[in-house]
Image (tube, rainbow, N blue to C red):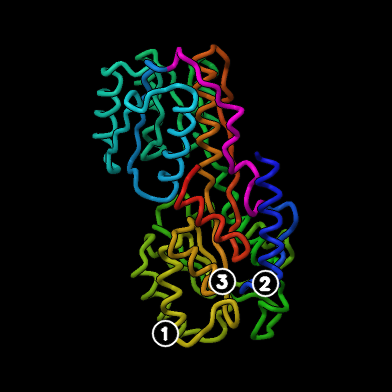
Amino acid sequence: MKKILALFLAVGLCAAALCGCADSAISVPSDTKLLGSDMSDDSSAYRMRSDLKERKIGISVSSLRGNFMKVFRTSLMNRLKKLGFKEANVTIYENNGDTELELKMLDLLIESGVEQLLVCPNDSADVPTITNKVVAAGIPLIYFNYIPDEGERARWAENHWNVSSVGADRSQVGKLQAVLVASIGLDRLDMNHNGMLDYVLIEGPEVSPLSALRKETFLAEMAEQGVPSQCLEDHFANWSREEAHAFMEEALAKHGSNIELVLCHNDAMALGAMLAIQEAGRIVSSDIYLIGVDCELEALDNIRRGTMTGSVFVDGISQAGDVVTNIMNNIDGFANESATCSDYVLVTAANAENIQGILEHPI
């Protein structure tokens, strides 16, 4: 199944290039993950087992909203049901980002008799407390969409605790954005002919370590790719479309056509910037480029039409598969790696339709 899907996607990417999509001339390096062949459901890996139907699993998340959780949850449940788990025995609690509520709900899940806990923590600072609580209850713990730092994972190993984690390498986001920029080529990017790329950066909250990491890895990869650049404006827009729109209006009024790229740390901000760009009479993928992160459906539609240049997608399907592997290892007495990483996916007009299909119909 995976080989067939990989071939289908390869044909699809070639066809998109031949059909003259908005970024058909953009050619990313061949080793860059555009759409992973592992984004499929290999049914041969899921054999029904009668001993799993009464197993209870608890899941703690901040929110079930958003692309990642929709894809991850659907894929996870499909895989668990194919193995023989009952959906009624999988309990999911949302805490809306409230740490106190998060801990109370974990207590409730533990008291309900769940045999394994899957946790997407609200904050890295909560992780030691969560770990201690679940370990004290004697329940295997799997963090998902999050990989704790080496110090925390070393604590698990030193104490021989049954704790593992599955997540994406968050440093890849800035790197993939830079790979896409470099693939466009300085000759197309340098529209004011000053020998470098002039861009504005729209970050999340000022205190966000995620924003800092994305910025750091983008700059490092740009240097690695040999693309000289300078940041004209760096603004914290708190993940907000409205704030990004207001900032972009000001930046365009100040710098005008010298802005050649707008780099955003999520798609909500990218969509706000896109509106300001359109209102200023600029044309994305023609006289300015625009790149985001997260692959909201609205952003994917704009990428397909060329009004956004690209985005970066976190692969919830791969993470679901890795989590199920860890669940089964816990049941069958096999050790899990402390950290299992999945790849982010670079999204352009060539594969945006496929990503949209995954979001609308998760496997």
The disc label shown at residue 19, or none: 2
| Pointer 3 with pointer 2, Cβ within 8 A | no
Q: Residue at x 63, y 55 (%)?
A: 175
Q: Residue at x 38, y 40 (%)?
A: 123
Q: State which tag comes first along the sequence, 1 or 3.
A: 3
Q: State which tag comes first along the sequence, 2 or 1.
A: 2
Q: Which residue is mark 3?
A: 231
- 68 or 142, which is in the foreground? 68
Image-quadrant location for residue 70: top left
User: Does residue 40 sit above or below 117 in this rendering?
Assistant: below
Q: Residues within 10 Å of mark 1 (few under 14, many from 20)?
A: few
Q: Amino acid at mark 3?
A: Cys
Badge 1 marks a residue whose secondary structure is helix
Q: Is residue 85 visible?
A: yes
Q: Is residue 92 magenta?
A: no
Q: Residues within 10 Å of mark 2 (few under 14, many from 20)?
A: few
What's the magenta bit mostly, secondary-structure-wise?
loop
Q: Spatial distance from mark 2 to mark 1, Cα to Cα? A: 29 Å
Q: Which residues are magenta?
A: 33-52
Q: Residues within 10 Å of mark 3 (few under 14, many from 20)?
A: some
Q: Amino acid at mark 1?
A: Glu
